[in-house]
Amino acid sequence: MNIGLIGLGKMGNNMRARLKKSGIDVVGYDTNPAVSDVADLTALAAALPTPRIVWVMVPAGKITDSVITDLAEVLDEGDLIIDGGNSKWTEDAKHAEQLAPKGIQFMDAGVSGGVWGLENGYGLMVGGTEEMVERAMPIFDALRPEGPRAEGFVHVGEIGAGHYAKMVHNGIEYGMMQAYAEGYELLDAKKEIIKDVTGTFKAWQRGTVVRSWLLDLLVRALEADPEFKDIQGYVEDSGEGRWTLEEAIENAVPMPVISASIFARFVSRQEDSPSMKAVAALRNQFGGHAVKELD
């Protein structure tokens, strides 16, 4: 099995390593020549046997648009492009329509797992036809966690469905992180009776209804910096949360928790909030997202 992989950043490079570990031949391209296997997209296409599969793992928006446009010039009929970035789901139909005249197939894949995916595997939510999914299944099997196929993988529906599911996943993630963060701030504020905040969260890791991987990562962050003294309480939002709210409004679905968590991130840009420090630390733990350190 062969695949081209475009974008060898924090996730893409780990994905390349996991794919290779499973015996898949990977030709990677990145604008950073230090990590790239080939010099350009023309060389990438030439290095892959036909029909080709090329996975795009670059930032959503103009960069993804540019890569897909450039790929359309070097790929051939019967090739398949998979967009594994966090593109807005409405863009997927546009990309599929753009590629259709050349007979190039397109599918979308929502990917979750962050910087831990190399070790633990990635959660995959894909959109496309049954034929496309079966064709790319060895790749999905290599990337997802080991175990039954239903664990860590879902063919959600047609083109766009994978990114839609990932969008909702990230909206839920916003709300979960905010709840943990607010709990942290309240525990930390009650110092006259709460003597071990980190230990409290650690106790919740086993046997409680709030246990989760996010909780495990929060404990990891607290053990490294119990008061988050080296982190500013400033948190970005990368788009999916806003898109989730747009869909909620469009479909008249009430989302008070997720909407509040997004507005809380806006608050973080106005003052140095302890709860936002916790959210910033969590994003750094699971996704390697940059934090703003205090001077």
Image (cartoon, rainbow, N blue to C red):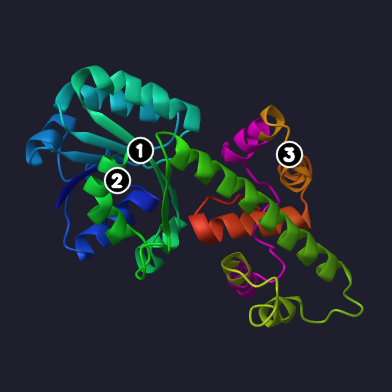
> Residue at the location (66% across, 53% down)?
294
Q: Amino acid at mark 3?
A: Phe
Q: Is residue 228 magenta?
A: yes
Residue 285's quadrant in the figure? Answer: bottom right
- Find residue 133 and name its label: 2
Q: Amino acid at mark 2?
A: Val
Q: Position of residue 24 (x, y in %)?
A: 17, 57
Mark 3 residue crowding within 10 angstroms, few (<14) / some (14–19) / many (20+): some
119 lies left or right of 139: right
Residue hosting label 1: 128
Disc 1/disc 2 C-alpha distance (Å) = 7 Å
Tell me, yes or no, if residue 86 can be seen here: no
87 lies left or right of 217: left
7 lies left or right of 251: left
Disc 2/disc 3 C-alpha distance (Å) = 38 Å
State whether residue 204 is above or below residue 145: below
Mark 1 residue crowding within 10 angstroms, few (<14) / some (14–19) / many (20+): many
Q: Which residues are magenta?
A: 218-247
Q: Position of residue 4 (x, y in %)?
A: 20, 43
